Structures are given as C-alpha cells and as structure tokens.
Amino acid sequence: MSEKTSFLSVTDPTGSSFPVPVFPTKEKAEEYLRQNESVWRSYSLLPDFMKMELIGFCIGAQGLKITYDPVFRRIFNVSLYPERLENLLSAILGRRVKIISIMPREGTQMREQASFVVMDILVQLDDGSYANVEMQKIGYSFPLARADCYAADIIMRQYAHIKAREGKKFLFSNLHKVYCIVLMESSPREFHAVEGKYLHKRTSCFDTGVYKDMAGLHEDIFICLDSFHSTVHNITKDSSDLEAWLTFLSAIEPEKIHGLINAFPAFAAIYQEITDFIKKPEELMNMLSEALFIMDKNMERMMVTELQEEVEAVKAERKSLEAERDAAVTERDVAAAERDAAVTERDIVAAERDEAVAEKQILEVKLRKILDYAKAHGYEYASE
C-alpha cells in the first residue's frame, strides 16, 4: 500500500519542514483505506466525527489528536522515549528533571473502571520525588478530592516501602514529595472562573506562616489545555518550553503546527512519527478503534455519573419539598388548633353569657313575684 502514498516535505519561508501526508481529496484517502478490507471495515464503523478527523489528517487539513489514548501512549512511551516525558515534566516543574525509574501501578489501592484518564504513569525523578502524570479527555468532577486520594495512595506506598527497608531507623523526613500532574483536554467549569489562567498549582501551608518553606508531601498541578488553546494563539522562538509542549498537546491546526516546528524544530521528529502512522493504516485504525472504545466507556461512565447526580438532586429536591410540606402541615395544624381554641373560648363565653342571662331572668321573675306580693298586701314602700 505504501507505493500508492506520497509524503512530501512542505517548506515554509523560515526554512523548517513539516511532513504532511498528501492525499488531494477525501475520495483518494478513502480509496487508499479501502485497499485493506479490515482497515476499511474498521473505518466504516467509526462515528462521523472520527472519520472526518482521520480524513482531515490524511489530506493534511489537520493534525492527529495527541490526546487520543493510544496516540498519547505511543508518543510518550517512557521505555522508548524517556526524554519526551522528562522534557514535559521539566517544563511544567520549571527545573531540569530526569526519570530514574518507572513505578508499577500494581499494588495501588485505587482502581477505577472506565475512567476518563488517557495516560496515568508514575515515575520517580532524580531528586527522589515522584510524579504521577495523567492525561484526561474530560476533567473529573471533584478533581481536588481525587488528587488527594491519589497522592495519599502514592505516599503510603512510599511509606510502606521505606519503612520496610529501614525499620526502626525510619524517619518521616526520608519521604519524598509527590507531584500530581493532571492535563485536561476539557477541564471542569470551575477552572474557567479565572479568565486567562490555564495552569493551576495547589500546595498545603499554614495560615500563620509556620513551616512556610515546607509545602507538605504533595503538590497538585492542573493544566487546562482548552483554556491554554484559547489563550495562547501564537508560538514564537521567545515562547517558553511549557507553551511549546502545551501547543503540541492541544493544536491540530496546520498553521499552529507549522509555527511550533519553526520555533522549536525538535518537535519535527515527533510529528514525522505521527505522520508515519498513515504508512501503517492497520495500526492507526487499531489506535482509533481503541480510542473510540475508551471514549464510549468514558461516556457511559459520565452518563451514569450525571444520572446519579440528577437522582441525588431529585432526592434533595423531594426532601426539601417534603420539609416544606411538613412545615405547611404543621402550620396548618397550629392554625387549626388556635382556631379550635378560639371557637372553644367563644363557646365558653357564650355559655357564660347565656347562663348570666338565665340567672338574670330568674332574678327578674323572683323580683316580680316579691313586688306583686307587696302590692297585694298594701306595702306602700314597695316599688319596682
């Protein structure tokens, strides 16, 4: 199939070259894919948006999304290209770092099924600290609590290892810092509250200033690629390494990719590797199919999570309405009791009044009898 594919080096005015797979039309690209039955079958099963992205990549209209799980894992394979993750971490942490080991995920207490995490890798750096690096397609709700749990998990693994090794000689000062670095393609809305900010760092400290030079055992760094992409539009030779890496992770527009390579030629080799995926359409289609599977699982989880949140919201609203109803019933009962008490009091007053009238009438009758008797017997002083 490769003999039917033409790969050209497009040279821009600055002299840098960017390899672009050249298929003049969508039809030519699909004709190329159709030559392999399994590739074409996989392509046919892709949703329309992924077909458009793939064809756009094939005709050079856009780059391939680095944030797709298999693509990201391939580009940042620490066993093959440790310098790539080292350079990314150096740009994020603001100091030169070197990876001395890749820590196995086995033994961790946390397990997440169908998570939104694209890449989750734990490495130890040359100063003894640990970096847990994640790439998320969709940023989690409650990201701070999740980061705390991950950091605690890594710290406890480290504690158990050092404690077992040093025994009674163990000191807490021997524990190394843990960096939780989370890159998010689509970040939660809370991160958009601060306009123009795409990098958010969190450390622990006392409000009184004590231990001000000690930030605890973990630091969280959240990077919003969507905010970065909408904030930083042009990359030049004066741009920072961090801006270069975040552009690499977020840009699919050819002009931005050209600008990045012109300013930072080291990325040309990585883009050449990405472009070479077209030479192996089976591998590319497998990566996209895997990405689609992961996306479907993520969407399923997100829908379940949203449904659970809706159910909880409905339950809370129902409880609120029940409380309002109970309050209204109580208020009604109080009003009815007060009304009944008023009616009872009115009846008592009426009864007392009727009793007084009856007594008055009895007295009047007795008085009339006395007067009549007096008059009949000639008592002149008798008077009504």
Image (tube, helix red, strand yellow):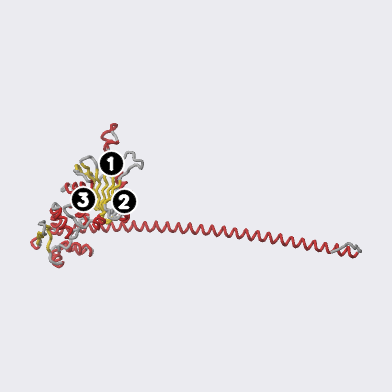
Mark 2 = which residue? 143
- In the displayed structure image, the side of residue 124 where residue 10 appears, left or right: left
Residue 368 is situated, as x and y percent measured from the top left of the image, at 83, 64
Query: Which residue is at 27% across, 43% downward?
Result: 178
Would you call the spot at circle 3 few (<14 residues within 10 Å), some (14-19), or many (20 or more)? Answer: some
SS state under label 1: helix
What residue does disc 1 label?
157
Disc nearer the start of the sequence (2/1): 2
Q: Amino acid at mark 2?
A: Pro
Residue ID for mark 3:
242
Residue lying furthest front in this view? 238
Q: Residue furthest top?
A: 168
Asked if the residue at tag 1 contacts the one at tag 2, i.e. Cβ–Cβ closer than 8 Å, the answer is no
Please state which amino acid type lies under the numbered disc 1. Answer: Arg
**Which of the image's four quarters has the N terminus?**
bottom left
Looking at the rendered image, the quarter that the C terminus falls into is: bottom right
